[in-house]
Amino acid sequence: MLVAGGCVLRPSLPAPLEVSLAPVSMARFSDAIDTVSTLEAYELVQLAAQASGRIQQLPISQGDVVKAGQLLLVLDQAQIRAELTDLQSKERAARLTWQRYEFLVPQGAATAQQRDEFKAQYIAAREAVIAKQADLAYSNLRSPLPGVVADVQVKIGDVLQSGDPFTQLIKNNTLLARVDVPSTYAERIRVGLPVQLSLPGTTKVLAETRVSSVDPTVTAGNQALLVKALLPNPGGVLRNGQRLRTRLLLESREQPAVPFVAVRQTSGQSFVWRVGTLKELEVQPGQAPIEKLRRLPARTRFALQTPVMLGSIQNNRYPVLSGLSSGQMVITTNLLKLRHGMPVAVVN
């Protein structure tokens, strides 16, 4: 205490800063793996020529919606029909010869061995006709299922060889998300875990589904575990081959949590401000003027800078891994003005 000109002067003390508080409360947090998945149509057919020939008709184009059994492609059939006519003629001749020997054997005019040889020739000729009829049928390629035609890689006049692919049929109403998960999570992955899909660069969830299967092996190259999740796509918003931001939710648990606005970071360390007593401040005084602060009223409360370890933010709250416990109060306003040991006045 100082005396000047007959007046008593008290040391200047900081005025309390008004602040609002929020409790450290329990909240549910989910461990998650953020990765990228590729969508694959659950029903996708690679269409290929079943016979060789020149394309005569091509009544489809990219984006066409087709029904099961609808005609997709017609190959030139002139040569096949000519070959079929020749084989049918040979079949009739072989059948007549065999039938003649069937009549001659009981008369003793031919042997059973001769009859059997001509019967075998007839059967071979008949099978050749059936095979050529199948080739003729293959010249008219029809859709095996309903779907949408993808890129058509041929045009009228092109020559196709048997087995040459020329387009795909895709049904986008049911998709399969192929998710590559680091093998370090293998023990925690199981069928039924929730999966959230969103567009790259956004957090808006486009679709939610669950893990439908887990590959029993790990890919040698990238050491990833392939997880598949089946999802309905009735509106056709998502498409085959699309890549999406994917979150695989491993588990959920209750943890102490603090609001996002209560957290500050300095040099990579996270801090919150608690409200404490002078006794608490004396335990960790830092650079606070303890001697001056002791002259304040006994019920004065102080801002205490508290280092904490936090998890990933969810729903604007951080899970507290260490440094705080449930029920404690943290300051949520005027954080930039606070200093360790500063007197505060709680307004809420």
Image (spheres, grey):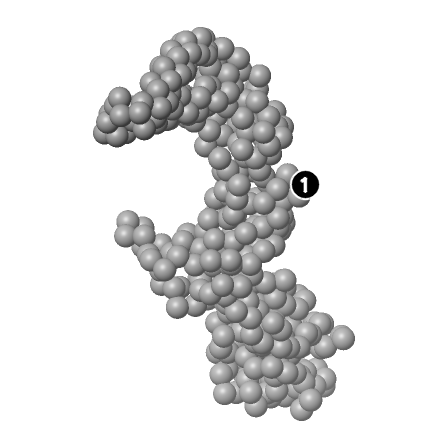
Please name whichever residue, 31 or 16, is drawn nearer the observer in this view of the structure. 31
Q: How crowded is the residue under tag 1: few (<14 C-alpha within 10 Å), some, or many (20+)?
A: few
Q: Is residue 250 left or right of residue 2?
A: left
What is the quadrant of residue 252 in the picture? bottom right
Amino acid type, residue under disc 1 in the picture = Gly
Q: In the image, what residue occupies the spot 63% across and 44% down?
A: 233
What is the quadrant of residue 111 in the picture? top left
Q: Is residue 206 above or below residue 120?
A: below
Q: In the image, what residue occupies the spot 25% across and 23% down?
A: 110
Q: In the image, what residue occupies the spot 41% across and 9% down?
A: 82
Give residue 45's position: percent from left, percent from top. Answer: 49, 35
What is the quadrant of residue 254 in the picture? bottom right
Mark 1, residue position: 235
Please name whichever residue, 226 or 57, is drawn nearer the observer in this view of the structure. 57
Give residue 326's position: percent from left, percent from top. Answer: 60, 81
Q: In which quadrant will I find the C terminus?
A: bottom right
Residue 78 visible from this viewpoint: yes
Q: In the image, what residue occupies the spot 59% across and 26% down?
A: 70
Q: Residue furthest front?
A: 107
Residue 3 visible from this viewpoint: no
Give residue 150's position: percent from left, percent from top. Answer: 53, 27
Q: How many numbered circles are shown?
A: 1
Q: In which quadrant will I find the N terminus?
A: bottom right
Q: Is residue 175 above or below residue 141?
A: below
Q: In terms of secondary structure, where does tag 1 sit?
A: loop
